[in-house]
Amino acid sequence: MTDIAIPISASNLTDAKAQVELAITASPDILELRTDYLQNLTADMLDELLAFTASKNQPVIVTCRDPRQGGQNDYPLDLRIAILTRAASAGADFIDCEYENYRNEDTFAAIRQALSSSNTRLILSAHDFSGCFKDLGALYEEMLAADPEAIHKLVYTPAHINDCFQAFKLLKNKRSDAIVLAMGPHGVITRILAKKLGAFLTFASLDEIAETAPGQIAIQTLKSLYRWDNITPNTRLFGVIGNPVAHSLSPAIFNACFDKQGIDALYLPILLAGEGDQFDSFIENVIDAEMDFHGFSVTIPHKAHALDYVERKGDYLEQLAADIGAVNTLKIGFDRIVSGYNTDYAGAMDAIESALAVGKHSLHSVDVAIIGAGGVARALVAGLSDVGASITIYNRTLEKAKSLAEEFNCKYAPLPKAHETNARLIVNCTSIGMHPNVEDSPLPQETIKPGTAVFDTVYNPLKTKLLQYAEQQNAKTINGAEMFIRQAMAQFKIFLAKDADENQIRKTILKNLL
């Protein structure tokens, strides 16, 4: 089993005790007493805090972190070692000593002597806040040789999500109790997948603002959103690939459906920076790692990268996705076969037809303004072209608008020209107005005429600034949730060959957006 540890990081004893009380309500497995956060630290303060946690029957790790490896206060080495040895003598469950300091002869002797007369276990740790270790595997072997009985903790800072796979590899091949984590936004998935890979523990913050290391997830988020208690070594993995991705509701929706339908699966946010080369490397890493990844939703800016990958290295590309020129769904099947699909097309057209209460052929010859020329825009243009709508594509980069328009025999214009449109249907296919930039709109209010229909494919927030303008102008509005629901249901079917619970999806969206 992989435990969850919550760090207690108060600057005084009163606040530390209050944090302990609050942490207990979240039911962690272990508390980490970050004594390096306490001001004017003394052994007596440690004793009082240990006595308090003991009265609460809480297992504890005592840490007095070296400032070179993330310590809060610059306490001298002799005080930090005195705190750790005192904790071992007092019966703390674990003490955490930096491997770099453990190699010091005096430190080694003091720690070993304290451990020899107690049941305390040693966590031997190494942290790199500036980047990746030069050779993670070699460092682990060195630490293992230095103390085979210790719990070996290696934490580093990835520059890209592709740097996380060395952590996964080490955990899969470990020969001791180990903690291997990557910090920051690119390393978030290592904290979630620690349980699947059998890490000794992971760290979760008390709340969203109490992290003691970059990228820590609040314990309630880890337990609820990411279904921590349901993760097993056999859990199938899915995720949404994008940049940015923190705003995505896909993890909440898919994980809620997995929970409701009793499916042993987990859906993750995959922050994938860079262009096609980095995308290709990520998919290759996923395949090589053999970690039970079975599929991905693909969003901005990687839909074209996904298409390119499947065309070059995949096994099957849905003809519709090829025609649209964008893949928003990847499935990894048996023998690591990668297939590409597009569910934006059906999701978008269904949303328009349902909201306007019309059949698709009623859109024939209707003037439509498409704002944007990315993956979602391609799906909308393809669908509306099929039914004979008269489309003008507006985009900040005119060459992209021109290229897309020429593919589908449409008109195009620079984005500022959209302010002059008289289209009956306006569709925003950009990220303008997406959380957190909720005050932005691709069009001013005066552009929207009464009787116009305005469709914003952004779903977070549910009512964007553009849709607020549309309501004020007595225009028909279509929010991005309708398209999102339909395309997500189609993805679920591709991933698992079964239907998603539509009511659960709607309930989750309303819970998160209203």
Image (tube, helix red, strand yellow):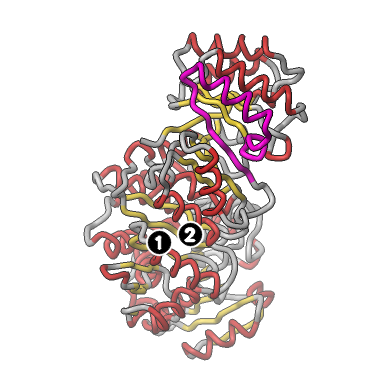
Residue 364 appearing in the image: no
Does residue 237 lie above or below 333 as drawn? above
Say if the magenta span includes residue 116.
yes
Residue 154 in the image: state x and y as whole percent. Answer: 55, 44
Residue at 38%, 64% (x, y): give it. Answer: 351
Residue at 29%, 52% (x, y): give it. Answer: 502
Residue 308 in the image: state x and y as whole percent. Answer: 46, 80
Residue at 49%, 8% (x, y): give it. Answer: 55
Does residue 496 lie above or below 32 as drawn? below
**Front residue of this view, candidates 314 and 58:** 58
**Front residue of this view, candidates 142 and 9:** 142
Residue at 55%, 18% (x, y): give it. Answer: 88
| Amino acid type indicated by mark 2 | Thr
Residue 238 in the image: state x and y as whole percent. Answer: 37, 57
Does residue 445 lie above or below 403 as drawn? above
**Front residue of this view, candidates 100 and 56:** 100
Does residue 181 lie above or below 237 as drawn? above
Pick out the residue farthest to the left: 498
Residue at the spot of label 1: 289
- The answer for how far apart the CA atoms under marks 1 and 2 are is 45 Å
| Amino acid type indicated by mark 1 | Ala
Q: Which residues are magenta?
A: 98-127
Q: How many marks?
A: 2
Residue 386 appearing in the image: yes
Q: Looking at the image, do the residues carrying marks 1 and 2 touch, with CB atoms under 8 Å apart?
A: no
Residue at the spot of label 2: 477
**Front residue of this view, candidates 361 and 12:** 12
Residue 430 in the image: state x and y as whole percent. Answer: 57, 67
Callout 1: few (<14), some (14-19), or many (20+) C-alpha neighbours within 10 Å?
some
Mark 2 element type: strand
